[in-house]
Amino acid sequence: MAKAAFNVSELNNYIKKLISMDYILRDITITGEVTNVNIHNNGNIYFSLKDKFARIDAMASQDDVNVELLDGVNVMARGTVTYYERSGRIFLYATEIKLDGKGNLYQRYLKLKEKLSNEGLFDASHKKKIKKYPSSIGLITSTSGAAIKDVVNLFRKRNKTCDIYIFPSLVQGDAASCNLISGVKYFNEVNIVDTIIIARGGGSFEDLFVFNDEKLAREIFVSKIPVISAVGHEIDYTICDFVSDLRAATPTNAAELATISEDEILSQLSKKLSDLNNLMERRISYSHLKLLNLYKNISLKNQVHKINFMTRDLIYRETLLNNSMKKILQAYGYELQKKRFYLQNFKLNKSKEIENYSYRLKNISVKLNSKISKNRESLDFNKKFLNYYFNSQIKDKFDKFKNYEKFILNYDLEERLKNEKERLNFLNIRLNSAYDKINKVEIFTEDGLEINSAKNAKIGEIISLKFKDGSVKSKVQKVEMRD
C-alpha cells in the first residue's frame, strides 16, 4: 500500500522539528562577511553572512549587537539556526556578534578613514603637484622586497640622469609605521629629493594594515615634498593612498608617474623644436611681407605718383592765384575808370599839376603793363612783385591822387573849366589809350591754365579768350610759330 502524501505545511513543520532537535544547531558560532544589512523599525537587524561558496540569512536584535554592522565586515555570530515554516527559509537568529580578524581591522580602517576625511586630509585642494622633471627621487621601502628591484630597474630604463635615494624601512609589523614616518621626516629635513615614493608589494589586508596608521597619514599630509603612495596591488586601498598627493596602482607604476622617460623628453623637445621652426618661419614671412609693403610705399613709381599729384596741386593753386590777381587788377582798373569818369564830369581847367599827374599816370600804366608782360615767365616772382607793387606804388599814387583831388577842388572851378576844356579832352584820349593797353586779351585752356605762347596751344583744343568787356570760346585749328 502506498504511503500517504504530505502537504507543504506538514513538510515544513517536520523540517522545523528536525532542525530544532539538532543540538549543534541550537548553539552555533558562524564566521562570515556581513552583507545586505537592513535595520528595521521593529528593532531587528536583518542581514546575511557569506563566504566564497555560500550564504545564509540572519537576524539579530539591536539590543544584542554591540558592534556596527556594515557591508564587508567579517564577524563571528553566535546563535540558533531556525526554520521559518511560512516561507520555507532557514536563517540564523544571532544573540551575540563580534568582529572577526580582518573584520575588526576593517572596522578600524573605516572609522579612521571617515575621521581623516572629515578633517579634510583627503581634499584635492591640499594635494601638491608632482614635479614633471625631477632631478632626484626618495624611495621609502624594504631593501629585501621585490618592489625595490622593480622600481630601481624601471627608473634606470626610463631616466638615467635622475638620482635615487633609498630609505630602508620595514613595511610590515608593529614597528613598520615608525620606520615609514621616520623616512618621510628624513627626506623633508635633508631636502635633497623632489618626490617621495612609499612603496610595498602586494599582501593581505592584515599585511598592508600598517599603511592605515593615523600618525603616518598626518606625517604625509604635512610633508613639504610631494608623496606618491604605491602600496599593494591595484585593488588594494589604504589610508596612505588617500592622504598622499598621488596614488600609484603598483610600485612600478609609481616609477612611471614620478619620472618622464628620455624618449618622451626627446619627443617633446623635437615637438618644441618643430613649433619653434614654424614660428620662426611665420615671423620671417610676416617680416618679409612688411618689407615688401614698405618697398612698395617708397618705390619710384609711387614717388612719381606723388610728384604728379603735387604737380597737379601746384597747377591748381597757381590757377587760383592767377584768378585772384586778375580780380585784384580788375578791381584796381574799375577804380581807375571810376576816377576817370569823375574827372570827366568836372570840366577842370588845365594846369601844370594836372598835366604832370596825367603824365605820371601814363608812366605808371606803361610800367604796370611792362611788368605784367615780363613777369609771365616767372610765376612766383610775379606774385611777390605784383603784391608789393600794388600795395606800395599804386596805393601810394591813389592816396596822392585823392590828396590832389581835394587840393584842386579849392580852386575856382568855373574859371578853370573854361580854360582847361581842350586840355581835358586831350587827357581823356591819352587815358583811354592807356586803359586799352592795360586791358589786353587773355587766353586760357579748359583747365584754367593761361596760354602765354603759341607753342603752348594744341590743335583741336578749346580755349577761352577774355576781353575787358566779355569772353569768347574758340577751337584751335592751326598753330604757326614765328622764327
Image: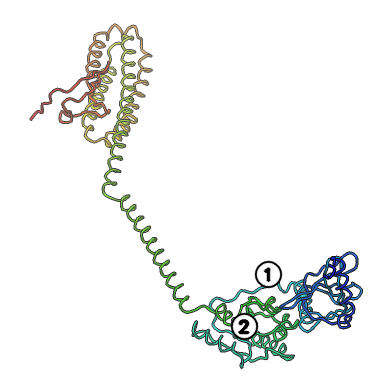
Q: Residue 125 bears which disc, if any?
A: 1
Q: Is residue 445 above or below residue 337?
A: below
The residue most toward the front is 1
Q: Position of residue 287 (x, y in %)?
A: 37, 58
Looking at the rendered structure, the kind of residue marked 1 is Ser
The residue most toward the right is 63
Q: Nearer the viewer, residue 4 or 433?
A: 4
Q: Is residue 83 above or below residue 363?
A: below
Secondary structure category for the residue under label 1: helix
Q: Residue 197 bears which disc, if any?
A: 2
- The local crowd at label 2, few if under 14, some if 14 to 19, many if 20 or more residues have their Cα within 10 Å, is many
Secondary structure category for the residue under label 2: strand
Q: Nearer the viewer, residue 59 or 73?
A: 59
Q: Is residue 4 left or right of residue 174?
A: right
Looking at the rendered structure, the kind of residue marked 2 is Ile
Residue at the spot x=83%, y=72% of the render? 90
Q: Residue 191 bears which disc, if any?
A: none
> Mark 1–mark 2 contact, CB under 8 Å?
no
Q: Position of residue 21 (x, y in %)?
A: 90, 79
Q: Position of residue 146 (x, y in %)?
A: 59, 89
Residue 67: which quarter of the image? bottom right
Q: Is residue 138 left or right of residue 98?
A: left
**Quadrant location of the N terminus?**
bottom right
Q: CA distance from mark 1 to mark 2?
A: 20 Å
- The local crowd at label 1, few if under 14, some if 14 to 19, many if 20 or more residues have their Cα within 10 Å, is few
N-terminal-most mark, 1 or 2: 1
